Image (cartoon, helix red, strand yellow):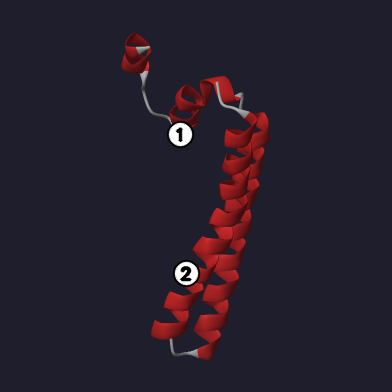
Amino acid sequence: VFSEMDQIWFLAICLILPLHMRLGMEAIVEDYVHNENTKSFCFFLIRILALILLKELVFFYFESPFEDILLITPIRIGCDLSYIEELW
């Protein structure tokens, strides 16, 4: 079971991660893409990707019961973790 402070940190990471990803990817595009039209298109795609990631992380945060977060996360992405139940 996660404490309130753990939940606050998790939400903060969920909100900061897409921004950090977007800034890093935009810096790479800025350095290596020289055509302005391609650069603008890449920036557009990066921003869309960051918004999708933010939406998914926030929805996951509000739908997830924090008691079972280690078992719920891999199941949502399709991993078989039946062996973990034996460890608990």
Q: Is residue 50 above or below residue 28?
A: above
N-terminal label among 2 and 1 = 2
Image point 39% across, 83% down: which residue?
32
Amino acid at circle 2: Gly
> Residue 30 has which mark?
none
Residue 80, position as x, y percentages in the image = 36, 23
**Distance of label 2 from label 1 (alpha carbons):** 25 Å
Of helix, strand and loop, which one carries label 1? Answer: loop
Image point 53% across, 70% down: which residue?
23
Left/right placement of residue 80 relative to residue 42 reads left
Q: Is residue 81 above or below residue 45?
A: above
Quarter holding the N terminus?
top right
Of helix, strand and loop, which one carries label 2? Answer: helix
Q: Nearer the viewer, residue 52 or 8?
A: 8
Left/right placement of residue 79 relative to residue 58 reads left
Q: Nearer the viewer, residue 72 or 33?
A: 72
Q: Marks 2 and 1: which is nearer the front? A: 2
> Residue 24 has which mark?
2
Amino acid at circle 1: Ile
Q: Is residue 15 above or below residue 30?
A: above
Q: Which residue is mark 1?
A: 77
Image point 60% across, 72% down: which residue?
44
Residue 8, position as x, y percentages in the image = 64, 40
Residue 9, position as x, y percentages in the image = 58, 42
